[in-house]
Amino acid sequence: MNKIPSHIAIIMDGNGRWAKQRNLPRHAGHKSGLKSTREVIQTCVNNNIEALTLFAFSSENWKRPKKEVGLLMDLFFTALQGEIKRLNENNVRMRFIGDLSAFSEKLQKQIRKSEDLTSANSGLELRIAVNYGGRWDITNAFRCLAEKIESKEISSSDISEKLVSDYLSLANLPEPDLFIRTGGEQRISNFLLWQLAYTELYFSDALWPDFDEDAFHQALESYASRQRRFGKTGEQVKGITEDA
């Protein structure tokens, strides 16, 4: 592959259906999906990919049955405890995006501990989106900007795309080059609505627990085969490449 994306964003979909196909409780699918998460992170580390953002729990997921949500929170906590040492050893810097205030103090404490432990690492920038929604992200950014205007730190004429981006959850990272969604669904489901404007989209029929390293490489190969034009013509892009 001659083109590797700098930043990949993934909706890890299909855990529940994977479990249902095997007559297992949905929670078993979420637990099995951890293996795929681990493989994808390791592949990003091995390929020197700069950033990876994973959609782990959306703001809409609270609507699921209370028992499933409770089990997800328990799994989230134990996964953090079990994986953080490996991530730190791989020089991964972990951060969480979303409204973390909705989680238990115990979980929030583990999140802060994970972020603190990996804060000095210089490798893969791993972002985990939890209780996150793209509309929430944009609304929160404009709320912050409105407060800046009220305090006269900025004026409305200062607002630009760049300034809005500076107040979004992924402000310090490049926008995703490649978006992957597993599970056969072809929508972005309120994930990174602003940031995905020019991202290459890739949809896989594989359910998340079946999305192994080979499946991930297929997504990377698909990305490498594409021409990214950003509003220009194909001829213009070719000219820029040749001049470079």
Image: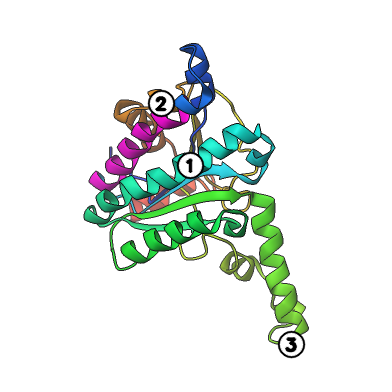
Residue for badge 2? 209
Most common SS among magenta residues: helix
Residue for badge 3? 152
Point out the tag, 1 or 2, that comes first from the N-terminus: 1
* Magenta residues (range): 29-46
Q: Percent position (x, y) of residue 20?
A: 52, 16
Side of 126 relative to 143 (left or right): left
Quadrant the C terminus occupies: bottom left
Q: Is residue 178 visible to us here?
A: no
Q: Using the image as rendered, state which of residue 117 and residue 6 is in the foreground.
A: 117
Q: Using the image as rendered, state which of residue 207 and residue 231 is in the foreground.
A: 207
Point out the tag, 3 or 1, that comes first from the N-terminus: 1
Cβ–Cβ under 8 Å for marks 2 and 3: no
Which residue is pictured at 53% across the width and 56% down the height? 97
Quadrant the N terminus occupies: top left
| Residue count near mark 1 (Cα–Cα under 10 Å), binned few <14, some 14–19, many ≥20 | few
Q: Percent position (x, y) of residue 66?
A: 64, 35
Residue for badge 1? 74
Side of 43 relative to 191 (left or right): left
> Hey, what amino acid is under mark 1?
Asp
